[in-house]
């Protein structure tokens, strides 16, 4: 039930830090959600938000620095697309801890079941003695 001990990669940690930082903001998460459906121009991505195009561009730059999105310039238009590989890497990191906590909670459940059975047996024995 121990976590696998490994020497973390400095570059990997830096990338994960950038991914989780980028995803910590609700606007950026909404942009990622939108891009999971299809690519979009910066203008189209900015449309649902009550903020300047410059502010949305800053959010996009953060997502781009985390390698969550790619930007392609077509003439004067920037088209953004989701890079699902970066999300997959973050998901795999989270999965390690999901597996760990599932094991811990399964062990706790087993322990509590044993305790409940022991309590039930003690209650029966006590009732038999008082009858």
Image (spheres, rainbow, N blue to C red):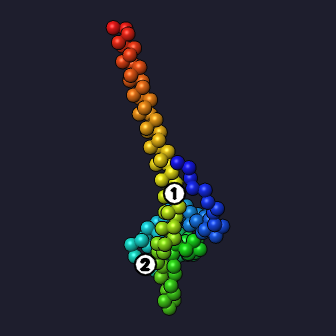
Q: Secondary structure at mark 1?
A: helix
Closer to the camera, 23 or 58?
23
In the displayed structure image, the side of residue 118 where residue 55 appears, left or right: right
Closer to the camera, 23 or 108?
108
Q: Residue furthest top?
A: 131
Residue most toward the right?
Answer: 10
Count residues near mark 2 (Cα–Cα under 10 Å), then give few for <14, some for 14-19, many for 20+: some
Using the numbered discs, state the Cα–Cα distance from disc 2 to disc 1 in whole angstroms.
30 Å
Taking the spot 42% from the left edge, 71% from the top edge, the residue there is 36
**Residue 84, horizontal then vertical, whole percent:** 46, 72
Asked which secondary structure carries label 2, the reply is: loop
Q: Quadrant of residue 127?
A: top left
The residue under label 2 is: 39
Q: Name which residue lies at 56% across and 53% down.
A: 3
The label on residue 15 is none
Q: How far from the left and from the top, in percent, is residue 117?
A: 39, 28
Label 1 neighbour load within 10 Å: few <14, some 14-19, many 20+: few
Q: Quadrant of the C terminus?
A: top left
Q: Position of residue 10 (x, y in %)?
A: 66, 67
Q: Tell me if 28 is positioned left or right of 15 in this view.
A: left
Q: Between tags 2 and 1, which lies in front? A: 1
Is residue 113 toward the left or the right of residue 101 in the image? left
| Residue drawn at the location 63% of the way across and 63% of the way down | 8
Total number of numbered labels?
2
Identify the residue position indicated by label 1 in the image: 96
Q: Residue placed at 48% from the left, 79% from the top?
A: 80
Where residue 57 sits, quadrant-wise, is: bottom right
Using the rendered image of the protein, determine whether residue 91 is visible from the camera's viewpoint. yes
Nearer to me, 19 or 93 = 93
Instruction: Tell me if residue 22 can be seen.
Output: no
How far from the left and from the top, in percent, is residue 88? 48, 67
């Amino acid at each position: 039930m121990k976590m696998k001990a490994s020497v973390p990669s400095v570059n990997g940690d830096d990338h994960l830090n950038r991914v989780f930082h980028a995803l910590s903001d609700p606007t950026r998460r909404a942009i990622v959600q939108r891009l999971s459906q299809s690519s979009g121009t910066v203008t189209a991505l900015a449309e649902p938000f009550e903020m300047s195009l410059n502010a949305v561009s800053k959010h996009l730059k953060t997502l781009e620095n985390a390698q969550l999105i790619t930007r392609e310039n077509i003439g004067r238009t920037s088209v953004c697309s989701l890079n699902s590989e970066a999300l997959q890497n973050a998901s795999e990191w989270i999965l390690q801890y999901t597996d760990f906590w599932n094991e811990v909670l399964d062990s706790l459940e087993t322990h509590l079941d044993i305790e409940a059975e022991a309590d039930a047996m003690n209650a029966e024995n006590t009732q038999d003695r008082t009858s």
